[in-house]
Each structure stands twice: as C-alpha cells, then as structure tokens.
Image (cartoon, rainbow, N blue to C red):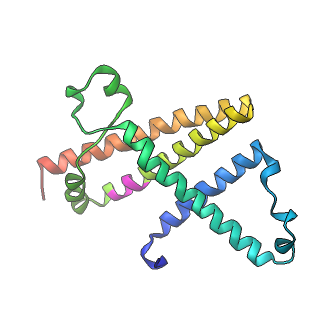
Amino acid sequence: MNVDNIPFYNILNMVFIGILFAVGLFILTPEIFVLKSIPFFESNEFLKTAVVVVVIYYVGFFIDRTGSLLIEKILKNKNQPSKRNFVSQKIQMNWRNYDEYQRAEKSSENIKILAREYTFSRNSMTLFLILTIIAIFVGNWVFCSFTWFATIFLYFSTKKHADKISQRVDYYKKNPK
C-alpha cells in the first residue's frame, strides 16, 4: 500500500476517530487496556507506540467502513423527496447518482469540502452509535445517554451535509459549466 496516495485528511480522520473510540472504550471498560502487562511491550516504547498508532488507525478505518457500508446504506435515498413517504422524507438523506456527483465535483471545489465534512460527520455518528451499543452491553446508562445524544446530533449534521451536496449536484446538473 502506497501511503503517498492516501490524502492526509483521511489519515487524520481515521486516527482521530480511532483515538475517540479508544478513549470511549477506556471509559467504559478500562480493564481491556493491557499493553503494560505484556513484558515485551514494557521494554520497547517505540514498538508500543507504533502498535498503538497502527491499531488506532485501523479502528478508525473499521469505523469509517462501517459507516460507509452499513449506516450510509440505511440512511440514503436516491429518490427525489416528492417521491418518498413522509417518514422517508424526514429521516433518510437525499442522495444523488455518483456520476452526477463527479460531474458536479469537477465544477466546484466546495463539493469536495462538503464531502469531507460529510464523511467526518458520518464517521463520528458511526463512532458514537458503536459506543452507545457498547455502553448498553456494559450497563453504563449515563455514558449511553451521552453517546446516544451525540449520535442524534451528528445524524442531523450528516443529513445537513448530504442535503447540501445534493443541492449542489442538482444545481450543477441544471447549470453545467
């Protein structure tokens, strides 16, 4: 894998989400953090740091893919709002064909920025949803309430970004440059 081809914001996004997940998991279940109890890691700080960074990145990557493959599939709807029922209009996100998105993206740098913000919001929503599920299993209802509130808040942020992207795509579809 060539790291030069991965945009820097993707690396930061995954590491940041991974760190937030690790912090949330530590708050919920501090007993699972056992790197110090492994003798090999006690003597090698560089290796311990490298392992932690790689694990955090891949946890963030897993959360990103979960959001993309599961959450996004549930929440997006390619039909125009006028062709959907009331609940779908209010809950599901407006979405456009990827080819239309690519044509609009070539016309506007703002769409790329909105797409990054959308991805970060979606990843954060997925993170807090996963932490909510873990908090339910652990029985930490205060943390569960916090993470559920954060999930709902981030859902509205994600939906707003998706709606803005759809509006931009529609605009560039009607007014090609």
Task: Identify which residue, 155 or 67, lies in the foreground.
Answer: 67
Give x and y (percent) for residue 111.
Answer: 31, 55
Indicate left or right for 119 with 77 as reference: right
Report whether residue 32 is seen: yes
**Residue extending furthest toward the top:** 86
Q: Is 102 placed above or below 70 here?
A: below
Task: Identify which residue, 142 or 62, lies in the foreground.
Answer: 62
Query: Which residues lie in the magenta part?
Result: 112-116
Q: Main secondary structure of the magenta part?
A: helix
Q: Is 174 placed above or below 108 here?
A: above
Residue sitting at x 66%, y 39%: 134
Indicate left or right for 55 with 87 as reference: right
Q: Is 73 placed above or below 111 here?
A: above
Question: Where, by quadrant of the figure, is residue 51 drawn?
Answer: bottom right
Indicate left or right for 76 with 140 as reference: left
Task: Identify which residue, 53 or 108, lies in the foreground.
Answer: 53
Residue sitting at x 50%, y 49%: 123
Give x and y (percent) for residue 151.
Answer: 55, 36
Residue sitting at x 82%, y 58%: 34
Residue sitting at x 32%, y 56%: 110
Image quarter in which the C terminus is found = bottom left
Q: Is residue 53 magenta?
A: no
Report whether residue 120 is seen: no
